Amino acid sequence: MDWTWFHRLASPPHIYRVAGTLTPWFAWPAGLLIVSALYAGLFLAPPDYQQGEGFRMIYVHAPSAWLSVMIYGVMATAAAVGLIWRMKVAHAAAASCAAIGASFTFVSLVTGMLWGKPMWGTYWVWDPRLTAQLVLLFLYLGYMALRSGIDDLGRADRASAVLAIIGVVNLPIIRYSVEWWNSIHQAPSVMKMERPSMPFDMLAPLLMMLLGFTLMFAAVMLVRVRAEVLRRERGASWVKEVVS
Amino acid sequence: MSAWAGVLWRDLRLAFRRPGQVVHPLAFFAVVALLFTLGYTPELGKLRQIAPGVLWVGALLASQLSLDGLFREDAEDGTLEQMVLSGQPVAALVLGKTAAHWVITGLPLTLMAPVVGFALGVPVAAMPGILCALALGTVSLSLIGAMGASLTLGVRRGGVLLSLLTLPLAVPVLIFGARATELAIAGEGLTGVLYLLGSLAVLALTLAPLAAAAAVRIGLE
């Protein structure tokens, strides 16, 4: 098998060029999908028979919650690739994931709270999902804090990569331990997603939004990777050519 | 003598020449419990309800106190570098230092917990269960802490960052530990939760030394 494509990924100018070319291919579909999913979700989808109009929060809440976990996976994979093959570009990719992942985690928490107020009558309960999501936010914050705490770039890359991988082992443990803890303690709160099926005109905007958010993540990440690569290679001659 | 036992013995001798290392976390643990009786209520019936949380959060924070120095002092005077260069597996050295940390902090905290628990109105019958739970839980806490301490080797004044890294990872230990303590106080069977705490400790014992060894190598570069 020909591995040149893989080795070329390690070259910063190549990545810079490829990321620049790819960005609009992700950004435009993401924008179109999100706008049309918002319209479909807010105006075309029928109101829920129990929650009325309130259920429409799901179109922002569920996709961001899903992405918050997926981005951690992407970040840890990139970190592992960087650690194993000593690929600086992979470390740059992991570094640019963290802030996006933390933002999606934060958005999912805030929209969940806004949704919880009318449905559960409170902004916050120590429900397993909510607690595990909060811990995920702290994991992201710890990753970013460790990265900014170490001055030497190569060390910061590798130390934070180890932390990201430790977090992967710990994430499922946290999720299930929190679930067991609460199922013993208090009556489970009603998770709205667990109704057997959703009618198609409710589900379609959700799936569109999910795809739109994922593409948006890809676009934002590509932009951030370019910026990160430029920052790291600021002394290199190809950067001077690109910037001038 | 194998490498990890050598490191363990050396760290223990160093610690007992500076008894403060052993005594300070214990005093901290007692003061935290005291603050709860002052800040919440002196009524034993009410204190008993929050005793699991107080015991575990107190033990968790107290074992955090001495973590920052776990690798830092040896890294600053070059000892750690010599240990890594000695050709012994780094994971074994990390395991030795972590075991020493547990003997110096985790074990005394466990032995002191019945005293603190008694002051919080915990019945004597619950003490064996609490001792088992803390003995297993503090093993995991020391190992998780070793990962945090090795990751923050390159950070100046890494104390706060160390807590930010390790406390989220310690969430499962805290949850099962507090649950075991609660069951013990209620006089119910806690074998199942002890098994879970034990499996967490075994998992940490297998993976944490490897992760911490990788981080020590990175920190020394």
Image (cartoon, rainbow, N blue to C red):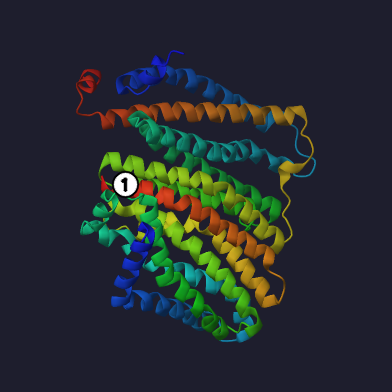
Q: Report x, y in % for residue A185.
A: 69, 63
Q: Report x, y in % for residue A120.
A: 70, 54
Q: Report x, y in % for residue B152.
A: 33, 53
Amino acid type shown at disc 1? Arg
**Placement of A79 over or under B137, stated as above or below:** above
Viewer-proximal residue, A193 or A71?
Answer: A71
Image-based side of B125 in relation to B109, left or right: right
Image-based side of A113 in relation to B170, left or right: right
Confirm whether residue B64 shows in the render. Answer: no
Which residue shows up at 51% across the image and 44% down it? Answer: A168
Which residue shows up at 53% across the image and 49% down it? Answer: A170
Q: Where is residue B201, by image quadrant?
A: bottom right
Report how many numbered discs are placed on residues in the image.
1
Viewer-proximal residue, A39 or B216?
Answer: B216
What chain is tagged by disc 1? B
Residue at the far front in the pictured view: B1
Which residue shows up at 76% across the image and 39% down it? Answer: A48
Figure quadrant of the C terminus of chain A: top left
Q: Report x, y in % for residue A43.
A: 68, 30
Viewer-proximal residue, A178 or B185?
Answer: B185
Image-based side of A84 in relation to B119, left or right: left
Label 1: how many residues lie within 10 Å, few (<14), some (14-19) or many (20+)? some
Confirm whether residue A36 shows in the render. Answer: yes
**Placement of A30 over or under B166, stated as above or below:** above
Q: Secondary structure at mark 1?
A: helix
Which residue shows up at 54% across the image and 56% down it? Answer: B202
Q: Which residue is mark 1?
A: B217
